[in-house]
């Protein structure tokens, strides 16, 4: 019943697996579903198929408790759950802009066909506004109205590397509902989160709204974050020509609480599976709805972001004294260490990763590029099989005439510039994340270039 509804999470990728495991931890009876038998096999055996701190321990504990199971059977899912969370992927479409809803359609249709009692279907995937209404019609096509199946929408705000915390201790819960029954079911399905907060004397704000708003909250939040990063990267561009230091500028504007100091780190730009894809899909959807102009600035946000990657290539050419020809700089005969491949530290995710994109561009310009990343090597190899990979930071740096730090892993931030200098062929470094101690590196004899800041004065 609604006191402790039984939950299913359809799609056990990054989102669904994390939610399934964390909600079992909160005390719910959870069934995770995926069409991928290999994924389900791994999860059932206690292995998380991706890198996320803390998740494997929770998976194993909750498998042992019996509260968490995985399946490839829609029938079993339909039988188990009162609330079904749709967590399947919504990849970028072939045209590079809109979102592909094929997985949403398949999972909802197949689930609906097997439902035999009242249940709530809740969308969690990031989708174009209007999808919840479409899902409702899809359900109506496949289930008799007497069953009383309802649809709701509840976006997620997970950050990779903090996903467990973000599910157990979210900074808000947003639900788009059409009825009191759906609202009550969703409240019950999140009661574990509210109870945990109460036990820690915190409160989790709950926003109950309509379908469209709930869908928009997610993309609006990501558009805002992307804009904040591109804003500071635009300031970095200006600092570069004006001789300013964007790191100090960010600090100074960030003291104003209306601006805030978070998400103001200039660097090689944002990447990952969400921000780049979501701002493009959001623009495409607004265009379809006739509000393209409202989001035209997001195109600029995207361009600023991509220009930061080119900036690294130009800095490399400048440091290596290779003037750019009409087709860009010729870096042939140079050896460059790229430290970082993942789109951010503590992640093995290389989707739309600026680090890997820059590594590929440097190689395309003719450089002998040696890549090292503490966690992202396997994924990087799959996406960019043509690059050379080294098994340690030292191996990548050995003999390099230029070192580019493009993901701010602690291993790189804490590296000893004297020790690395002894290995390198020449002491030149580009700090694509402004994460190194510039003065320390300069004192160790490195020619240092950051993003949007002048070379350090000694
Ligand atoms: C993001 C949102 O933060 C999250 O709320 C949403 O649910 C999914 O998308 P995530 O993709 O895990 O999460 O990464 P995040 O930590 O937000 O970083 C995104 C990118 O922006 C990274 O490439 C990061 O390096 C970059 N970034 C972040 C900056 O360049 N500067 C900053 O100040 C902050």
Image (cartoon, helix red, strand yellow):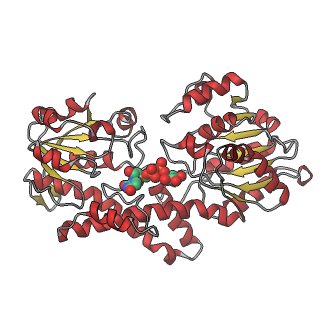
Q: Position of residue 108 (x, y in %)?
A: 72, 48
Quadrant of the image containing the N terminus: top right
**Closer-to-camera residue (312/75):** 312
Taking the image as shown, residue 457 lies to the left or right of residue 162, namely: left
Residue 341 in sight in this render: yes
Question: Which residue is at 60% across, 63% downward?
Answer: 217
Question: Which residue is at 58% across, 25% downward?
Answer: 42
**Closer-to-camera residue (236/170):** 170
Question: Which residue is at 67% across, 60% downward?
Answer: 131
Q: Residue furthest front?
A: 201
Asked if residue 311 is positioned above or below residue 41 in the image, the reply reads below
When asked about the image quadrant of residue 342, the answer is top left
Asked if residue 73 is positioned above or below residue 189 in the image, the reply reads above
When asked about the image quadrant of residue 64, the answer is top right
Asked if residue 106 is positioned above or below residue 286 in the image, the reply reads above
Q: Position of residue 38 (x, y in %)?
A: 58, 27
Asked if residue 274 is positioned above or below residue 243 in the image, the reply reads above
Taking the image as shown, residue 397 lies to the left or right of residue 304, namely: left
Q: Position of residue 143 (x, y in %)?
A: 84, 50
**Closer-to-camera residue (202/455):** 202
**Closer-to-camera residue (107/355):** 355
């Amino acid at each position: 019943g609604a006191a402790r509804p039984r939950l299913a999470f359809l799609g056990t990728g990054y989102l669904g697996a994390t939610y399934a495991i964390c909600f079992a931890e909160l005390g719910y009876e959870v069934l995770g579903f995926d069409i991928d038998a290999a994924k389900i096999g791994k999860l059932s055996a206690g292995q998380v198929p991706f890198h996320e701190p803390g998740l494997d321990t929770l998976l194993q504990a909750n498998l042992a408790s019996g509260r968490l199971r995985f399946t490839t059977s829609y029938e079993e899912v339909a039988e188990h759950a009162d609330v079904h969370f749709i967590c399947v992927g919504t990849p970028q479409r072939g045209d590079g802009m809109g979102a592909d809803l094929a997985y949403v359609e398949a999972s909802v249709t197949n689930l609906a066909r097997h439902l035999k009692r009242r249940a709530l279907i809740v969308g969690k995937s990031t989708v174009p506004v209007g999808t919840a209404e479409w899902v409702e019609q899809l359900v109506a096509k496949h289930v008799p109205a007497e069953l009383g199946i309802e649809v709701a929408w509840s976006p997620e705000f997970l950050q990779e590397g903090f996903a467990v915390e973000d599910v157990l201790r979210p900074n808000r819960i947003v639900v788009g509902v059409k009825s009191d029954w759906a609202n009550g079911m969703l409240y019950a399905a999140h009661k574990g989160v509210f109870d945990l907060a109460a036990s820690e004397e915190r409160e989790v704000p709950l926003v109950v709204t309509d379908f469209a708003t709930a869908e928009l909250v997610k993309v609006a939040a990501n558009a805002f974050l992307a804009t904040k990063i591109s804003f500071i990267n635009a300031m970095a561009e200006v600092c570069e020509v004006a001789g300013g230091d964007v790191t100090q500028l960010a600090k100074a504007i960030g003291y104003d609480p209306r601006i805030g100091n978070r998400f103001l780190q200039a660097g090689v730009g944002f990447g990952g599976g969400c921000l780049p894809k979501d701002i493009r899909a959001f623009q495409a959807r607004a265009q379809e709805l006739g509000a393209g102009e409202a989001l035209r600035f997001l195109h600029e946000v995207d361009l600023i972001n991509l220009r930061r990657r080119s900036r690294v290539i130009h800095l490399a050419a400048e440091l290596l004294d290779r003037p750019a020809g009409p087709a860009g700089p010729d870096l042939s005969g140079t050896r460059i260490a790229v430290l970082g491949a993942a789109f951010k530290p503590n992640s093995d995710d290389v989707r739309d990763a600026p680090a890997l994109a820059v590594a590929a561009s440097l190689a395309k310009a003719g450089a002998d590029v040696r890549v090292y990343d503490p966690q992202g090597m396997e994924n990087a190899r799959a996406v960019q099989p043509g690059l050379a990979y080294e098994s340690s930071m030292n191996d990548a740096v050995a003999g390099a005439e230029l070192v580019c730090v493009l993901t701010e892993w602690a291993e790189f931030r804490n590296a000893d510039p004297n020790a690395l200098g002894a290995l390198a062929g020449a002491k030149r470094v580009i700090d694509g994340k402004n994460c190194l101690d510039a003065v320390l590196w300069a004192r160790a004899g490195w020619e240092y270039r950051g993003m949007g800041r002048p070379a350090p004065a000694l």
